[in-house]
Image (tube, grey):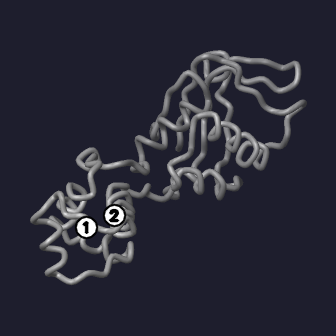
Amino acid sequence: MAGPTGRGDSLGAALNNLLRAQVTPRHRLSTYHAKHWHAQLSQLTGTQRGYQALDEAGLDVTAKTLLNWLSDPEYNIRRSYRDLIHTAYENVAIVPADPLPDHITRGQYEISGVVRTGDDERTRGTRDAAPLRIDGSRGHWDEIEELWLAGELTGDEFEDHFVDDVIVEDIGEGTDGWEFPGASYTVEVR
């Protein structure tokens, strides 16, 4: 039975596409794009989540003051209050990433594409050559997950950490390290 699959023009891109198809990445809500403090405050006070973000940012004003601010977009508020409103707005606009699921960190990976270690370069996952099989449960996923949760897991970062923290942990360094110099990769998790 085939499992989740990712494809890309590099190993890192294929891994990233696989992960993004499985769990929600950290992202900005498209409805949160206001620049002016008044528009931000208006949007925040429209939801309970927004009020909570204002409270967490440290905005502590009376309901009357809040109404005064909302009724007049030209109201002159202190810069420190504008900064708190902006902080709350930014915090509520960002949707955190889902953590990496067990089937990703404990899965059996099959990598198809060009794989090189030392002088040995082969196209894996063809009719003539089996895919490179990696046991993800032997890997160390902490740095990958940290970058993922921060919204900073690029394809290059994913590839580097996957090689160092998952492949090497499972099957060793190879003859002279692992390289993936091809232009097309497929990664499947079972």
| Side of 126 relative to 48 (left or right) | right
Report x, y in % for residue 30.
Answer: 27, 44
Q: Nearer the viewer, residue 100 or 96?
A: 96
Q: Residue 4 vs residue 177: left or right?
A: left
Q: Which residue is mark 1?
A: 50
Counting from the top left corner in percent of width and height, residue 137 is at 65, 55
Point out residue 27 in the picture as x, y percentages from the top left corner: 39, 48
Q: Is residue 107 above or below residue 77?
A: above
Element type at mark 2? helix
Q: Are marks 2 and 1 in contact (CB under 8 Å)?
A: no
**Figure check: 52 above or below 39:** below
The N terminus sits in image quarter: top left
Q: How many marks?
A: 2
Q: Secondary structure at mark 1?
A: helix
- Relative placement, left or right, of 187 versus 38 is right
Q: Residue at point 53% right, 44% down? A: 190
Nearer to me, 188 or 76: 76
Residue, x 26% and y 52% (percent of image)? 36
Q: Residue furthest bottom?
A: 62
How many neighbours does mark 2 have within 10 angstroms: few (below 14), some (14-19), or many (20 or more)? some
- Residue ID at (32%, 60%): 89
Give percent across and percent down for residue 183: 61, 16
Between residues 21 and 57, which one lies in front from this camera angle? 57
In this figure, which residue is indicated by the disc labeled 2?
82
Which of 51/144 is in front? 51
Type of the residue with mark 2 = Arg
Q: What's the residue type where badge 1 is placed?
A: Gly
**How far apart are the two marked residues, 2 and 1, measured between alpha carbons?**
15 Å
The residue located at (67%, 22%) in the rendering is 124
**As displayed, is residue 78 above or below residue 9?**
below
- Mark 1 burial class by Cα count in 10 Å: few <14, some 14-19, many 20+: many
